[in-house]
Each structure stands twice: as C-alpha cells, then as structure tokens.
Amino acid sequence: MTPPRKLHIKSYGCQMNVYDAQRMVDTLGAEGFVETADAGDADLVILNTCHIREKASEKVYSELGRLRVAKEEAAKAGRAMQIAVAGCVAQAEGAEIIARAPTVDVVVGPQSYHHLPQLLSQASRGERAIETEFPAEDKFGFLAKPSREAIRARGVSAFVTVQEGCDKFCTFCVVPYTRGAEMSRPVARIVDDVMQLTESGVREITLIGQNVNAYHGDGPDGRAWTLGRLLYRIAEIPGVARIRYSTSHPNDVDDDLIAAHRDLRAVMPFVHLPVQSGSDRILDLMNRRHGAADYRRVVDRFRSVRPDIAFSSDFIVGFPGETEEDFRATLALIDQIGYAAAYSFKYSPRPGTPAADMQEMVSATEMDERLERLQSLIDSQQAAFNRSAIGTVVDVLFERAARKPGQLVGRTAYLQPAHVMASEDIIGQVLPVRIDSLERYSLLGELVTTPAARPDVASLMSIGG
Ligand code: SAH
Ligand code: SF4
Ligand code: F3S
C-alpha cells in the first residue's frame, strides 16, 4: 500500500471558505490524502483565498512566495509538492496567478471544487490546470461527505452551506462576481447533511450563505421554501439543540423568518444583520436598497417577537463621498440599535466593482479616525452587553476543554465564550450557568445544579436589553 499523501489547507475570509475547506478535505480524503498542520511537510498545499478587501487578496502573493521556497526544498529532498490556489482570488485573478506565480500548479474557483482530483492529476502530468468557470452542475452533489471521525474531530458546532452566491450587487462588493449568481440547495439535501452531523454528535448547526435569508431551495412539496420554513424543518431533527444562520440581508427578512424566531426555542436569539452605514445617502450609493429607518423597522420586528434578541453587524467607513455628517448618521444608528458585537472595515476599492470608479475618496487619516471612533462605540456597547450577563443564569453549549486544566469552555446564545470548572463528559450538552464575572470577552461562572434556577424570561430580557 502506498503511504497516504499529506494535505495542508489554509483558509482566509468568511465561513463559506471554512465550510468549503472541510469539503475539500473530505473529497481529497477519499483520494487518499490526510491532513497535516505543517505546510512544509505537505504533498499538496491549498490556499483557500478571499478577495473581499485588498489586504486579504495581497496575502495570497506573500504566502505564495513562502510556498515557493518550501516547494524548492521539498524538490531538493526528492519530494514533489503541489500548490493549488482556491477561493475568491482564484476566481477573480486566476489567469494572473498562473502568469505571476509559476510555482502554482492548480487554480480552482469556488464552484469547481468537485473537479479538484482531476485538476490535480492533470497538474501531475505537467500541465498546470485552471478552472474558474461556473459549471452547470452543483458542486455540493459531488463533494464527498465527512466521515464520522472527521465530524467528531471538528466539534459540536458545524456549518452547513444552504445558499451560495449573491444577486444584490452592492457597489463595493466582489462577492457577486467571485461566487456567482444566487443558488439554494434543496431542502432534502440539507436535512440529510444535518442528520449525518447530529448522528455523530453535532449539537449546533449554523446554516450559512452569502445571503442566507434569500434562501429559496426546493422543498419536498415541490415548492420553493423560505429560510424560515427551513428552520422549522431543521428544528425537528433529533439532536439539534441550537440553530443559527448567517449572513442575512435586511431586505430579505420576511414573516416566516420572524415567525421562526417567535416559535422555535432552538433558533438562537442572535442575528448577524449587516447594515454597512447609517446614512441614507451612502446606503443609496452602496446600492443597499434600504434606508436607516427601514433597517430599524426590521430590527423592531425581530425584537417584537423575541425581546431578548441581540444583533451584530458589519460596517464600512470611508465609502467614497462619505462626509462627517454621513459618518455621524452611522454612529447615531449604532446608538439607536445597541449591538452585542460588530465588524468594521475601512473601505477598500475592488477592481471591477462600480464603487472603484467613484472619485471622491475619503483620506486615509479620516478613515483611520472614523474607524477608531466607530470601534470605540461598538466596544463600549459590547462591553456593556457582556457585563449585563453577570449575576444572571444563561444556557451554555459546552464545546471543549479550555487551556486551564479542569476548565471547560462553551458558548452562550450570543456566542460569548463561557468558562466553568467541570468534567469533560458535559461536552455537547446545553446547561445553565450562573455568570460571576467577565474577563475581557469571556464570561466566567459555575454550573447551576438546581433546575429551579433555570433562566426565567425576565433574566433573559435583561441580557438582551
Ligand atoms: N453578504 C454580506 C457580507 C459579505 S462580505 C452582506 O450583505 O452584508 C462581508 C463584509 O465585508 C461586508 O458586510 C462588508 O462590511 C465588508 N466589505 C465588503 N466589501 C468591502 C470593501 N470593498 N471594502 C471594505 N469592506 C468591505
Ligand atoms: Fe456583497 Fe452586498 Fe451581496 Fe453582501 S449583499 S455579498 S455585501 S453584494
Ligand atoms: Fe472573501 Fe469570498 Fe468569502 S471574497 S468573504 S472568501 S465569499
């Protein structure tokens, strides 16, 4: 028997890339590859790249520089190393990568991962391979499923891609070009995947998509199902304790989704709902197709059915033409909503997007200054939100042993890490924890043993408020 070949994969960017990386590992596992943490030791290195901002895509070329050296050293030792570039940079700049980086053997776009084995064997014959078409068939039907061992090793929380691509064309964003048109996987396939995960011990499912609440997959009744309907179906699967979904667009929040939050305990009261800006003028230039007031109404709809719900968001500062007044409107919106967390970015012009042609650039110093102001506001909201958990009892899904001996770490409904001293046999369980203190972003507490101390509605509301 030939020894297994070693695969090292490095992912950048969003959750879709994390999920895709796992499916590539599963698919290449069926071809005899095992994963290694050491790129230098690998027979195949895959860079699973992100194109969203300039910094993200520049990383690829510096990483390729390092890999070229590793590949030369492997060759000196008589070992062939293959290098593949996958992900959104591969899609956007595939031909340029082939031209600029002779060390790269394979370039493969996000919709073609099921063709990886054949692209790699083409490269082994000495022909560098590139595939960045959007094939007619859906890759998910062809990618191998994870083994029981792989699922166990990945832990109690798992991502499942339900939707991919985007038709929104926000003027700053590359995703509609790198991931292609919106497509939704059929309900039955998603249910199969979730069942396979829960049978191997997964307790929390995060349904993911670039625009997940635009989901409209074929249901078993032959009609297109909404994300809300899908959530009801997933909640029926034995073993599913918690369901999350990400990332949502404010314009695609419908009655079904709100009803799912109202009716289903398993659906976590924490929603990532990016708004990007609080200025109607900038939102219009971004082609977001909603204003700040529309966004506030969407948030209110969620809150009317789940007073304990919390939100996170993404923000861009320094979009072309953003004035101090526009920026203040963003701060005002943040004040009005009150976030539990948020990601914020300096605008980065992306080749091929409409905003890249907009002239009125905000200066680098202004961008830095705005980012700092925005982040300090978010930090203070996040700190207040975390502090409000102290003294309350919250449900925690236990994930793994913490660094400190005897300590376990889990997550609250709001994804806050929570640490307790407890034995490892509670991993995978959701148990009430009394929160005693806060250490940076982590909650510290103790398991509550008496069932009477489970959180009542009032304490849940105090966490959300
Ligand atoms: N589909 C999601 C997010 C996709 S990208 C949505 O609709 O919001 C993740 C985040 O990256 C975006 O929410 C945005 O805040 C940020 N982003 C995207 N393009 C960017 C750019 N050109 N410059 C800076 N940030 C950007
Ligand atoms: Fe990009 Fe806008 Fe689509 Fe989000 S909704 S992926 S920001 S184009
Ligand atoms: Fe990046 Fe592509 Fe995700 S550009 S954020 S890896 S969809």
Image (tube, rainbow, N blue to C red):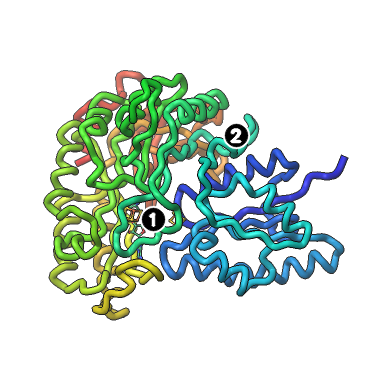
**Residue type (three-letter) at the residue carrying disc 2:** Lys
- Mark with earlier residue (1, 2): 2
Query: Which quadrant of the figure contains the C terminus?
Result: top left
Q: Which corner quadrant of the image does residue 228 belong to?
A: top left
Could you say where residue 242 lies in the image, as x and y percent from the top left? 39, 30
Query: Which quadrant of the figure contains the N terminus?
Result: top right
Could you say where residue 285 lies in the image, as x and y percent from the top left? 21, 65
Q: Which corner quadrant of the image does residue 153 belong to?
A: top right
Residue 323 in the image: above or below residue 123: below
Q: Return the mark for residue 176.
A: 1
Residue at 48% x, 29% y: name it. 189
Q: How many labels does the image show?
A: 2
Q: In this view, does 150 lie to the left or right of 440?
A: right
Where's ligand 2: which quadrant?
bottom left
Could you say where residue 160 lies in the image, as x and y percent from the top left? 47, 37
Residue 417 appearing in the image: no
Q: Could you say which is closer to the camera, residue 338 or residue 364?
A: 364
Q: Could you say which is closer to the camera, residue 402 or residue 217?
A: 217
Label 1 CB, ligand 2: below 8 Å?
yes
Q: Return the mark for residue 145.
A: 2
Residue at 33% x, 51% y: name it. 167
Mark 2, other Cα within 10 Å: few <14 / some 14–19 / many ≥20:
many
Residue at 63% x, 44% y: name it. 25
